[in-house]
Image (cartoon, grey):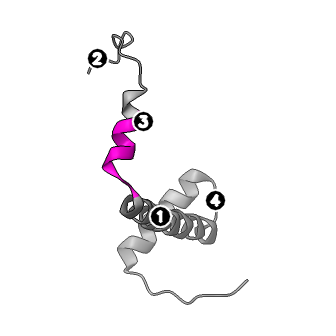
Amino acid sequence: MSALNLRLPDSMHRHIKEVAKKEGVSINQFISSAVTEKISAIMTEDYLKSRATRARRKDFKKILANVPDRRPLSGDQR
């Protein structure tokens, strides 16, 4: 594991401290989790963009043609 020296505005440090305490975790654990979530979101976006470049409209329409034509379930109309 490596250490990272991080400079934050005092107000942000205060908010992180409050939220971490509320969540019952250390500041380090909170920041580590937040960074992990951000990395995951970026990697997921990159993956989906990569997959989208390989997509073909005719394949999409072929898949949609197999979806049964039926009324939406109650609550799914919107």
| Element marked by disc 4 | loop
Disc 2 residue type (three-letter): Gln
- Disc 2 target residue: 77
Question: Who's the residue at 42% across and 36% down the image?
Answer: 63
Asked if residue 73 lies left or right of residue 34, the reply is left
Helix, strand or loop at label 3? It is helix
Mark 3–mark 2 Cα distance, whole angstroms, equals 22 Å
Name which residue lies at 65% across and 87% down. Answer: 3
Q: Residues within 10 Å of mark 2 (few under 14, many from 20)?
A: few
Which residue occupies the foreground of this view, 62 or 47?
62
User: Is 40 positioned to the left or the right of 10 in the image?
Assistant: right
Instruction: Read off the residue under disc 4.
Output: 25
Q: Which residues are magenta?
A: 55-63
Q: Give residue 52's position: percent from left, percent from top.
A: 38, 59
Q: Residue at x 56, y 67 (%)?
A: 36
Rendered-image quadrant of the C terminus: top left
Position in image of residue 73 (x %, y %): 39, 12
Please report whichever mark, 1 or 2, sits nearer to the chain's N-terminal start. Answer: 1
- Whole-angstrom CA distance, mark 4 to mark 1, is 31 Å
49 vs 27, nearest the viewer? 49
